[in-house]
Image (tube, grey):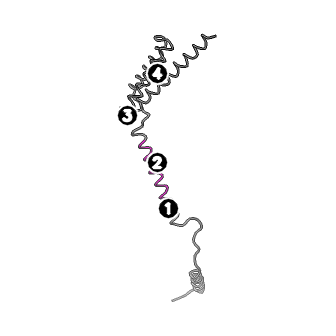
Amino acid sequence: MITDANSSSVDQASAANDAEPIAPPEGKSAGEIHAANEAADRAARLAEQIADSSHRDSPTQFSLRDLFVLTTIVAVELAGLRWFGSRGLAAVIGFAAVVWLFIIAVYQLKSPFGRLLFWSLVIGYILALSTVLVAGLASSH
C-alpha cells in the first residue's frame, strides 16, 4: 500500500481537532426554541378561537327587520312631538322606557335588539325632555 506523506499530517490534524471540544452555537438552545414555538402555536390557536367565536354568535348583528322596526319606532318618537307636544311626548316616551325596562327585567331579555330598543327609548326621552326645557326657557324670556 502506498501512502502519501501529506495524508499522515491530515490524520494528525483531524485527531487534534477531535480532541478539542466544539463550542455550542451562539443563540437560543433547542429547549428555548421549542418553548417559543409552542407559545406561538398557542397564540395562533387562541386567535383562531376568538375569530371563530366572534363570527358565529356576534351580539351586535341585527337583521334588516330589526333595523326597520327600530327606524319606525324612532320615526314615531319624532312624530310624537307633533302629536303630543313636547311635554306629552316626554311623558309618553318616559313611560314607554320604564315599561320596556320592566319587561327586560322580568323576562330577562338577552336580545341585543331589545336592549337597543330600550336605549333608543331612553335617548328619545332625553331629547324630548331637553326640548321641553328649551321651550320652557324660550317662553320665559
**Marks 1 and 4, how far apart in space?**
59 Å
**Residue at (52%, 64%) from the top-left corner?**
32
| Amino acid carrying mark 2 in the image | Ala
Task: Tell me the tag on residue 47.
Answer: 2
Quote the CA–CA distance across marks 2 and 1. Answer: 18 Å
Q: Secondary structure at mark 3?
A: loop
Marks 1 and 3, Cα distance to the nearest angstrom?
A: 46 Å
Q: Name the amino acid, label 4.
A: Gly
- Using a 10 Å C-alpha cutoff, classify the residue at mark 4 as few (fewer than 14 neighbours), some (14 to 19) or many (20 or more): many
Q: Earlier in the sequence, mark 3 or mark 4?
A: 4
> Image height check: is 110 above or below 123?
below
Of label 2 and label 3, which has the lower sequence position? Answer: 2
> Crowding near pointer 2: few (<14 within 10 Å), some, many (20+)?
few
Disc nearer the start of the sequence (2/1): 1
Q: Is residue 1 above or below residue 78?
A: below
Task: Indicate which label's residue lies in the foreground, 1 or 4.
Answer: 4
Q: Which residues are magenta?
A: 35-53
Q: Which residue is mark 4?
A: 94
Give the Cα distance between marks 3 and 4.
20 Å
Query: Whole-Å distance between the Cαs marked 2 and 3?
Result: 31 Å
For marks 1 and 4 on the same chain, the one whose residue lies earlier in the sequence = 1
Q: Which residue is mark 1?
A: 35
Q: Which residue is mark 3?
A: 108
Q: Nearer the viewer, mark 1 or mark 3?
A: 3
Q: Residue type at mark 1?
A: Ala
